Image (tube, grey):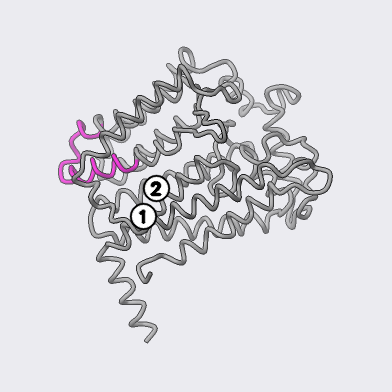
Amino acid sequence: MKQFDWTLFVSLIPLLGAGLITMRPFVGEGGDYCFNRQIVWIAVSLFVFFVFSRVDWRFLKTSGLLLVLFVFALVVLGFLLVFGKLVRGSSSWLDFFFFSIQPSEPIKLLLILILAKYFSRRHIDIANFKHIFVSGIYAAIPAALIIFQPDFGSAVVFVLIWLGMVTVSGINKKHLLLVLLVFVLLFAASWFFVFKPYQKARIMTFLNPLGDPQGAGYNALQSMIAAGSGQIWGKGIGYGTQSRLNFLPEHRTDFIFAAFAEEWGFVGVLIIFSCFGVLIWRILRNAYLAQFNFEKFFAMGLSVFLMAHFVLHIGMNIGVLPITGLSMPFLSYGGSYMVTIFAGLGILMGFRKHSQGALQENTLVEFLGA
């Protein structure tokens, strides 16, 4: 297990613990359904993580499996538009009696792998604009299907994954500005022809959360109150009034950061930020040590994926970004997202195990410790 990144793994433990403690019910709060289910999902995720870390995933560079899985994923997303389980106005879920799956989560990981393969095979002539366009199609098709579910938050993550990976691939800066201009135009068109009324309301509420404090602005306002009321040291575990008394909606999922900040305060938030920072550092470190571009691009895409969820979730919890309903990595309740990110980290460890760079790093560590 010398090639295993134990620093990365240890950084996950406080994050998982923070999520469990925040969603754990206390006296008078009712059942502990989410808490118990989350423990099961963490166990499943860790199993996937360690199994995936033992696989040599480099075969994906030359295999056609990714394309087959991508086509299948598009079929699943199309199926969801007709037969998906409706949850909070969005048909994003497949119901399997005892549990439900949100397919958009593993498809994000699939997109990272596909783009990593595409950019690694065309790294020399990536400055050609056609590669930016073709790679954008890979992200645009699933993002469009997800918007129609509708799930605007996940669609944004797809775009950010593509934008982050195409940026580090060596894109011409003029082309990047052109791409950003296209995004602005697409957003303007979406406002008139795609966005649902409640999505427009969320954006307007973001601009003026006090405009409708009992209606569209309620969630944003309660979230800001919860996050701010924790102050420096927090109110203490189990004493978060906004979440424990159910003033803060969805405090185990969409607003778990605000619930955590209320009970743990600024000090607790710093701990979470530090652990997440270590995680991203280790992912980028593995990208630097990777032997081939495929592994490098995958690690970069994985870091963008996690940072997108992290920043967007916290942003909507503290009122600086519109509410999108995205999960907080490792803290929020939910199995699909938890298993997906641990699968991604497992693939990263699989690359590391079979990478010459990892062996070089371990050799250096052993030499300095000798």
- The residue wearing badge 2 is 302
- Three-letter code for the amino acid on which mark 2 is drawn: Leu
Q: In this orientation, which residue lies closer to the viewer: 213 or 100?
A: 100
Q: Is residue 254 shown above or below 240?
A: above
Q: Is residue 4 shown above or below 178?
A: below
Where is residue 355? Give x, y as percent. 27, 62
Residue at the spot 48% in from the left edge and 13% down from the top edge: 192
Where is residue 75? Give x, y as percent. 35, 24
> In terms of image quadrants, where is residue 228?
top right
Of all residues shown, which one is farthest toward the right? Answer: 28
- Three-letter code for the amino acid on which mark 1 is drawn: Leu
Q: Residue 348 carries which label?
A: 1
Question: Where, quadrant-wise, is the N terminus in this rendering?
Answer: bottom left
Q: How crowded is mark 2: few (under 14 residues within 10 Å), some or many (20 or more)?
A: many
Q: In this orientation, which residue lies closer to the viewer: 91 or 294?
A: 91
Question: Where, quadrant-wise, is the C terminus in this rendering?
Answer: bottom left
> In terms of image quadrants, where is residue 264?
bottom right
Of all residues shown, which one is farthest toward the bottom? Answer: 370
Query: Any magenta on residue 84?
Result: no
**Helix, strand, or loop for circle 1?**
helix
Residue at the spot 65% in from the left edge and 39% down from the top edge: 255
Tell me: 26 left or right of 260. right
Q: Give the range drawn in magenta.
A: 112-132
